[in-house]
Image (cartoon, rainbow, N blue to C red):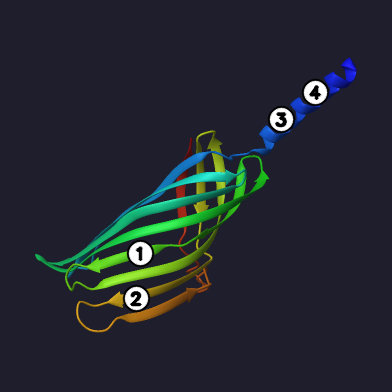
Amino acid sequence: MKKLLLAGIALLGFNANAQEENKGLQGTWWVAGQVAFSSTDNGTTETKSNTIVPIAGYFIAPTTTVGLGIGVINSTTDSGSTTVAESNTFIVQPLVRKYWGLGGKFFFFGQASLPMTFGKDKITDDKTTSIGVDLAPGFDFVVNKWMTVETSFSLVNMTSTTIKPDSGDSTNSFSFNANPFDLNPGDRKVGGLRVGVKFLF
């Protein structure tokens, strides 16, 4: 009876350890984001823009995470001392991501996101609303227990855009892009390549 009881306790301990190992990153929070600044001067006009989109997420399963990005894009175009274009755009982007191990600290992931933007042209008062779907594969390298380095690119994206002018009728447009590679010889680029770090806690 004692041997049977000890075997049962050992089995329970082994099962608990196995469950802990299979837990992966479940229950882990993470933060990342996008920060970009650019300035273009063609001699006649100068355009400055900045993008700030912090993202936070949570692993709901060992290899599955959900996240939400919220941020802004600001753009201004000046011709001499006159501002000829200025816009502010608010961004909301929920996402879900699934990971697969490639061995060691390397992981492959597939991400689906729903970017939504709400913009306003400060010169004309036109309002622009866009809702899209973006599918992006990528790779993640675990540096240590609290940081990873990742890269991804847009594979397929669809966007529906509505422009509502200050006066007049609204216009709608739809775009679909399923070609992330520019196949022109000598100019091969990956569409929307993103490289960044993710912090775990």
Q: Is residue 171 left or right of residue 95?
A: left
What is the x, y in percent for residue 99?
61, 50
Q: Is residue 56 left or right of residue 26?
A: left
What is the x, y in percent for residue 20?
67, 33
The secondary structure type at the circle numbered 2 is: strand
Q: Amino acid at mark 2?
A: Thr
Crowding at dot 2, Cα within 10 Å, few <14 / some 14-19 / many 20+, comes out as some
Q: Residue at x 35, y 59 (%)?
A: 91
| Tag in front: 2 or 3 | 3
**Residue pointed to by mark 3:** 16
**Residue pointed to by mark 1:** 117
The secondary structure type at the circle numbered 4 is: helix
Which residue appears farthest toward the bottom when viewing the image? 169
In the depicted view, which residue is nearer to us: 3 or 118?
Answer: 3
Instruction: Name the N-terminal-most of marks 3 and 1.
Output: 3
What is the x, y in percent for residue 176?
48, 75
Instruction: Name the N-terminal-most of marks 2 and 3.
Output: 3
Residue 10, numbered circle: 4
In the depicted view, which residue is nearer to us: 170 or 173?
Answer: 170
Which residue appears farthest toward the left when viewing the image? 81
Q: CA distance from mark 4 to mark 1?
A: 55 Å
What is the x, y in percent for residue 1?
90, 17
Q: Is residue 19 above or below residue 179?
A: above
Instruction: Name the N-terminal-most of marks 2 and 1.
Output: 1
The secondary structure type at the circle numbered 1 is: strand
**Residue pointed to by mark 2:** 162
Q: Residue at x 44, y 68 (%)?
A: 132
